[in-house]
Every structure is written in structure tokens, then in C-alpha cells.
Image (cartoon, grey):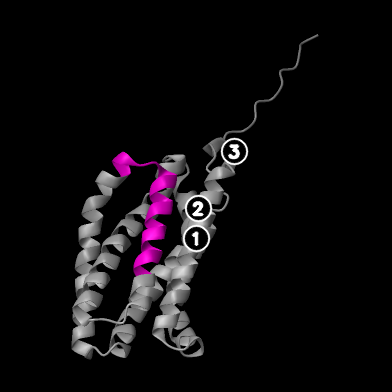
Amino acid sequence: MGGVPFHTTRLDLGMYAVVMGLIPLLTERGASPSTAAWALGLGGAGQTLGRTLYTILSARTSVTTRTVTLITLGGATTATLALIPGPMPLLIVLAVLAGVVRGNLTLLQATAVTDRWGTTHYGRLSGLLGAPARIAAALAPWVTAALAAPLGGYPHLFAALAALSVVAACLALLASREGHTRPLSRSVPSSEPASRPRTQRP
């Protein structure tokens, strides 16, 4: 499976950390808690919209192209939220755009196994691919709260998360170029017993 679990783990950590940190980020920018909550909710609506667009994207791009593109776009929206202080309507629009990208990323992860190796050994490969990512997603709330203060606030945290997305995109591209997206026969041992040599009768 090569480097795929590594960039999906970084992707999940960054994606869920952005969700957890959006309300504190906006309140630091001057939004009221209710306005920040509305922005988060509208970002969820954007996520639903993004999922409806994934079919078009998957039909027109290769696995590597859409993986690198979506991770890069996720990093770009995170970076804009980190760098742009306002006005608040613009930040809400950016939160919605981040949700659109996030919606595509969730489907990108959901189809990661079938797009690369088909449906054979789907359960085993999904477990190997998804376990590190799920752990990273579970740790995201703690990471968000623990790092915000040492980094100097949520804008700096979002800048760090954007940099993490760049690392994930580079890993995805590197994994493709090094041929880590290999035929399934090389990545999973065959479950069929090896044929025994025939013994000649005297």
C-alpha cells in the first residue's frame, strides 16, 4: 500500500482539526459565537454540495490527479482562513468553500481502496488504510486545543494545518511516482495455496 496510509492520516488530522478549530478561529476574528456556529453549519452544507460534485471530478481525473488536487485545495482554503482577517461575510464564504472541498475529500477517502486495488480483499485493505486515519481524526480535537496556544492562536494553527496539507499532497504525489499504487497481487498475498509439484510414478 506504500505511502497511501501516511498521507491519508495527515489528511484526516488536518481536515478534522479545521472543523474543530473553525469556531474558535472566527471568534478570535471578532465573530459572535452564534455567527461562528452559523459559519460552521454553512460549511457543513458546503460539504454536502461538494459530495454531489465528486462524481464529475472522478470521471474526468485520475486517482493521483484528484488526490493531489483536493488535498492542495484543502490546504489553500485553510491557508486563506489563516491569513485573511475579515470581513466576516468573506470568512463565512471561505468556510463554505472549505466545506465543499472537505465533502470531496471524504468521498476521496471512501473510494481510496476500490480506485486503486478494486474490491478484492476490500475489508482487509480498508482496515489497513483506515485505522491510522481514524486514530488521527479522533486525536484532532485534542491536537487543536493543545497546539493553538503554543502556536500563538488559531490563525497560526490554521497556517500549520495548511502546511500539513502541503506535506500530504507531496506524499501522495511521491507515492504515485514511486509506483506504490501497485497491482493487488503484489500488495496482498494470495489466499490460494501454492500448487504442489506432481510426483512421477515409478
Q: Is residue 31 magenta?
A: no
Residue 164 vertical position relative to residue 144 in the rendered view, above or below: above
Asked if residue 68 is among those painted magenta in the image, a careful observer would answer yes
Dominant secondary structure (helix, strand or loop) of the stretch shown in magenta? helix
The residue that mark 1 highlights is 168
Residue topped by disc 2 = 172
Q: Residues within 10 Å of mark 3 (few under 14, many from 20)?
A: few
Lateral position of residue 166 relative to residue 22, left or right: right
Q: Quadrant of residue 144?
A: bottom left
Q: Which residue is mark 3?
A: 186
Residue at image location 52% in from the left, 56% down from the top? 170
Q: What secondary structure is marked by label 3?
A: helix
The mark found on residue 79 in the picture is none
Q: Which residues are magenta?
A: 58-78
Coordinates of residue 149 in the picture (x, y in percent): 47, 90
| Residue 131 in sight here | no
Query: Which of marks 1 and 3 precedes in the sequence?
Result: 1
What's the amino acid at mark 1? Ala
Pinpoint residue 155: horizontal percent, then vertical percent.
Answer: 39, 82
